Image (cartoon, rainbow, N blue to C red):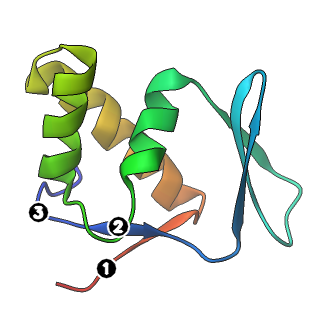
């Protein structure tokens, strides 16, 4: 589980390109692509090195008019996926 007080930042070597199908992420030096749906794209846009996971969940709950509990599942699963693919890093507290 991703701790709610953690803050993450996108790696410098990650390229994000907006296409008709959504946002496509790739890390330089790899041939792996990650295509983001609308929810994942909204989460990605909030990862800026300033927003805690709590803040991201609160903002997205307001944006999508969902309870924070519903948003929590999507955010934590996506953050774990991004960490596993080495697309983001945790900021030191």
Q: Residue at x 57, y 73 (%)?
A: 11
Mark 3 / mark 1, whichever is N-terminal: 3
Asked if residue 8 is positioned above or below residue 81 in the image, the reply reads: below
* Mark 1: few/some/many CA within 10 Å (<14, 14-19, 20+): few
The label number, if any, that marks residue 5 in the structure image? 3
Query: Which class describes the residues within 10 Å of circle 3: few (<14), some (14-19), or many (20+)?
Result: few
Give the Cα distance between marks 2 and 1: 5 Å
**Label 3 to label 2, Cα distance in Å?**
10 Å
The spot of residue 20 in percent (x, y) is 78, 22
Disc 1: which residue = 91
85 is higher (above) or lower (below) than 89: above
Which residue is rendered at x = 33% and y = 29% of the image? 74
How far from the left and from the top, in percent, is residue 36?
61, 32
Relative to 11, 75 lies left or right: left
Numbered circle sitting on residue 8? 2
Asked whether the beta carbons under mark 3 and mark 2 sit within 8 Å of each other, the answer is no
Q: Nearer the viewer, residue 18 or 6?
A: 18
């Amino acid at each position: 589980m991703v701790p709610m007080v953690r803050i993450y930042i996108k790696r410098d070597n990650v390229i994000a390109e907006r296409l008709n199908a959504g946002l496509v992420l790739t890390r330089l030096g790899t041939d792996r692509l990650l295509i983001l749906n609308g929810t994942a794209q909204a989460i990605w846009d909030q990862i800026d090195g300033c927003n805690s996971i709590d803040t991201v969940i609160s903002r997205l709950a307001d944006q999508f008019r969902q309870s924070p509990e519903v948003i929590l599942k999507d955010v934590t699963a996506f953050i774990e996926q991004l960490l596993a693919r080495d697309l983001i890093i945790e900021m030191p507290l």
